Amino acid sequence: MDQFVEENLKTIKQEMESACRASGRRIEDVKLLLATKTVPLEKLNRAMQAGETLFGENKAQELRDKFPLMQQHQQVEWHFIGHLQTNKVKDVVKYVTLIHSVDRLKLGLALHQQLTKMNKTMDILVQVNTSYEASKFGVPPEKAQNLIEQLSQFETLNIRGLMTIGKLNATNEETRHCFRLLKNIQAQMEEKKYPGVKLDILSMGMSGDFKAAIEEGATIIRIGTSVFGQRYLPDRYYWNENKRGND
Ligand SMILES: *Cc1c(COP(=O)(O)O)cnc(C)c1O
């Protein structure tokens, strides 16, 4: 049991490689992001010792708690992958290099205002709800173009790509459909050539579906459970808290 973070990382890497081979992609073109929600620092440290450098957090508070560890490992990069409330923007932009979960204009505006104050820019992804599940955040696919257009007016935001959570507990085909939809939106948006918008990142695929995601074109996969083990909080705690709340 003791070796398991290291062992799990090895297994994931092998599976990433085989998915890349199966789809004629290069392993350098797919990044492994470790999703760290609820994971204790001790385990994160092990992953960092094993050479992992990309981590994703869902909550501002947890990010702040884990930040001291980050400072001991200069090469480590944090992304924000969870639902971002506008009143938490300030806490998050200090720590991360990419926000995966921009899904509404109000959030874009809050980010722009904060970044303007800090005289800073930020890379972002637009989160799309490709499964149309009410429990998930993300802009509906048919509204993605409109949101991207609106966000592209904020000169502090660099729109770098798209993110989605594939349909869970679904058939392989249903999940792949989500990933293909994201890839199609990417292609459509690239054709529009919005100034300052370059959608080269596709963040998709988690423990249960990352192989399919790689085969469908993911450039970042987000893995938690398969590396760190089962979480004690259900994901709905992260994915639909305050869904009907203030923002
Ligand atoms: C928790 C989480 C993941 C990782 O999920 P696992 O199934 O544990 O690999 C990926 N993306 C987001 C947005 C998450 O909240």
Image (cartoon, rainbow, N blue to C red):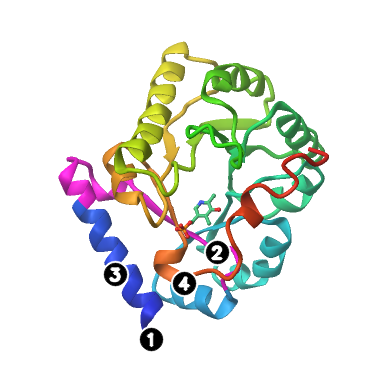
Q: Quadrant of the N terminus?
A: bottom left
Left or right, 210 with reference to 149: left
Residue 33 in magenta? yes
Separation of residues labelled 2 and 3 (CA atoms): 18 Å
Question: What residue is pinned by disc 3?
Answer: 10
Left or right, 237 with reference to 141: right
How many callouts does the rendering have?
Answer: 4
Residue 192, percent across and down? 47, 12
Which comes before the other along the chain, label 2 or label 1? 1
Residue 141 in magenta? no
Circle number at residue 1: 1
Which comes before the other along the chain, label 1 or label 3? 1
Q: Give, as a single range, the part of the protein colored magenta.
A: 19-39
Question: What residue is pinned by disc 4?
Answer: 48
10 Å crowding of disc 2: few (<14), some (14-19), many (20+): many
10 Å crowding of disc 3: few (<14), some (14-19), many (20+): some
Question: What residue is pinned by disc 2?
Answer: 36
